[in-house]
Every structure is written in structure tokens, then in C-alpha cells.
Image (tube, grey):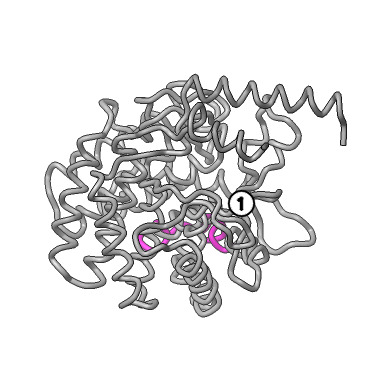
Amino acid sequence: MKKQIIQVLNNTLLKPLEVRYCSQTIYEVLIGCLRLYEATNNQIWRKRAEKVCEVLISIQQSDGGFDIGYEFNFGRIHNKGESTSPELVSLIALTKYYKLFGGEDVANAAHRAASWIKTKAIRKSENKWIIPYAPITTNEVMVYNGTSFAAGALGVYLSEFPDNDLEIIYNGMNKYLYSVMQKERSTLGKFWYYSDQNRVDLSNVARKKIDYYHQMQQVEIHSEAQLVFPNEDQKRIILEASEHVTEKQDIEGKIPYLNFKSDIHVWGFCSCASGFLKASKVFGDKYEEYRKRAQQVYEWIEKNAWNGDYFYPILSHHNKVIDNRFYVRSDAWVFNSFALAVKEGINKTKYLEICEKSYTKMASVDFSGLENHASNKRKRVTALTLTKIANIKNRLWPK
């Protein structure tokens, strides 16, 4: 009965919302197309990249930043239309496109995004810089990964477009990010807690949350920058963050989402493969180990999540499908990660075929569709009500 009620709620009041042109979908597909063009020199991937790049430029906000395209809670409610720092991966996509194919419109879009960083970045001390997660809403960091994505984007941008002021910010962001990494005595490497530890609005559980998937996304982005515009603090970040996650990988290749019970969300899990692959290019002595770890992730996703048409978005640690719906944003992340595998010569023929099918599926819905992370007032009220009911039940009938 309980499962039936949950199923009804998931199909009604908690049903995923429709989102058009989520920026993450667009920049992930664009970077994936560019990687596949580099891997194959096939003009079809250039044409596809051109089409997706046009979409990315079309959704750039008037202030030069990028918005994910839907409401969600990052500690405050993010309003649709507000530029946020994690979406600066768009700047990486634009710069990579420009390096390959040029285009004045692409360069201008990149300059506007870089200018957004310059306007929104904040100097914390003489040599440390941060950028708020959502600068229109709050000047607080809130979540560390926003500064990582900004720093990585700046490194890639600066490798093509020198700017002394932005270089100071870039170096300062990396210095800040390394300074807020944490160390556990019994584990390898270092990590970031997901949320800024200076926040006063967190429960004890929320404060100690570690998100291994986002950490490896940060590794990937920092590695992209390190390979073209090196920074010593950033080099330390990549190694420490990667080493910490190596201990979390099991014999099947699985890595947990969080440091407490959680399912495998494939859009984030694939980033562990991308992060390890990119880090392997930064540290030659880790090349074979990190490449093998990435291969394990790809093999698990192909075996358990790929259904021949798209990737199941959420699975259990027992390899059971929990959500079988097609989420285009989720597929975009996996598509891009598999494109990197193709570029790096991992199972190239098979994974290229998967990328082709994945792209075709996403293009068939114009890179838009259901989004399980999107929020609105109805979903928030429903979730809050269910939480209150559960709390009352636990007080009346404690386990």
C-alpha cells in the first residue's frame, strides 16, 4: 500500500516538471560533440556542435551569466532566470568551441560570461577569491562547487584570452578552494563538505554532507583548466580530491553519491569516470590507475543503465533500476562522459555507437524534457507536508 501511494504521488503532485533548454543539458551536449569531433574528425559532429552552440548562446542571460532554467533549493530558492556560478561550465564549452572553429559571436558570448565572473567575484583576503553560488540572491558562497566551476572556466578562458585581472581572480579562487578542503586522518586525500562550513542555516547532518559526484565534477573542471593554464594550488586540489574518492570505489566500480545512504544517480556517477580520466592526464604516475577506475565506471553504467535508447537515471547499489524515465539533462551528462571515453580511446567503437544513439534521442526532443531536480511551489508544499506527516508518525509510533 505504501509503495502504491508513493507511486501515485510521484505521478501526480511530485511529478517531474518539463524544462526547455536547461543550460546543463546544452553545455554538456556541446562539449560532448566537440570531443567526438576531435576523436573522429567526422563533420557530422561539427555540424551538431554548431547547432547546440547556437542554442547555448541563445539562452545566455542579459547579464552575461547562465541560468540552469528551473527553480530549485540550494539553501535559498533559486528563481528561474537568475545566473549562477555552477553554470559557468558554459564558458568552458564556448571557449572550447572557439578554439576549434572560431566565430565572433562565440567569442563575444565567452567575453560576456568572463565579464560576469569579474563583476560577481569577491575578494575574501589579499590573495583569496570566491564567487557566490547565486549572486543576485546572496553574497554567500553557500556551496563550494560554484567557485570550482568558475575557476575551471576561467583557466580554460585565460588560455585563449589573456586578462591580468581575471588571472588574479583565477589564482585566488584556487588558493581559496584548497584552503577549505578537509582531511580525515584515516583516509587518503582531502575533500570538500558540500556546503560552506561558515553557514549558520544548516542542520548537523546537512553540514557534514559530502557529495562525491560533485567532487569529481570539480576534479574534471579543474583538470580541464590545469592542462591549459596551470596553477600549483589547483594541481594539489586535483590530486587530493581524486585520491579521496579512490577509497570510495568498490570492486564493481561503483562510487556512492554521498557519505550517507543514497542511490546511484547516473548523471553524477559518470562524472567520476570523467574526473579520473582528466586527472590521469595531469598526473602521469596515476595514469594507469585512474584510467582503470574510469573504465570500471563506464562498464558498470553500460551494463546496468544503458537500455539501448537512453540511460536509466537512478539505480540502487544492488544494480536495480529505481527510476526508468528519460531525463534529457541526465543523459547529456552521460553522453559527454562517454564522448570523453571515445576521445581517450576507451572501447571506442562501442561507445561511439552509444553516443550516436544518445545524441539522436536527445535531439529528437530538442534537448528539452522532464527534469526531476526542478522544483515549484506545488512540489515544495507536498514534500514539506509529507515530511511533517512522517515526523508526527515517528513521534507517535517511534521505531
**Figure quadrant of residue 190:** bottom right
Q: Is residue 327 left or right of residue 34?
A: right
Whole-percent x and y of residue 324? 47, 51
Decide whether residue 155 is among the magenta residues: no
- Give 141 or 311, whichever is nearer the viewer: 311
Whole-percent x and y of residue 79? 42, 23
Q: Is residue 357 left or right of residue 229?
A: left
Decide if residue 229 is in sight here.
no
Q: Residue at x 30, y 44 (%)?
A: 163
**Figure quadrant of residue 81:** top left
Q: Residue at x 60, y 48 (%)?
A: 211
Q: Residues within 10 Å of mark 1 (few under 14, many from 20)?
A: some
Whole-percent x and y of residue 357? 28, 62
Secondary element at image label 1: loop
- Give 187 or 258, whichever is nearer the viewer: 258
The residue that disc 1 covers is: 263
Decide whether residue 229 is among the magenta residues: yes
Which quarter of the image is occupied by the N terminus? top right
Q: In the rendered image of this protein, does residue 315 appear above or below residue 129?
A: below
Q: Residue at x 58, y 69 (%)?
A: 253
Q: In the rendered image of this protein, does residue 168 appear above or below residue 286?
A: above
- Give 303 or 8, whichever is nearer the viewer: 8
Q: Which residues are magenta?
A: 225-239
Decide if residue 115 is in sight here.
yes
Whole-percent x and y of residue 356? 26, 64
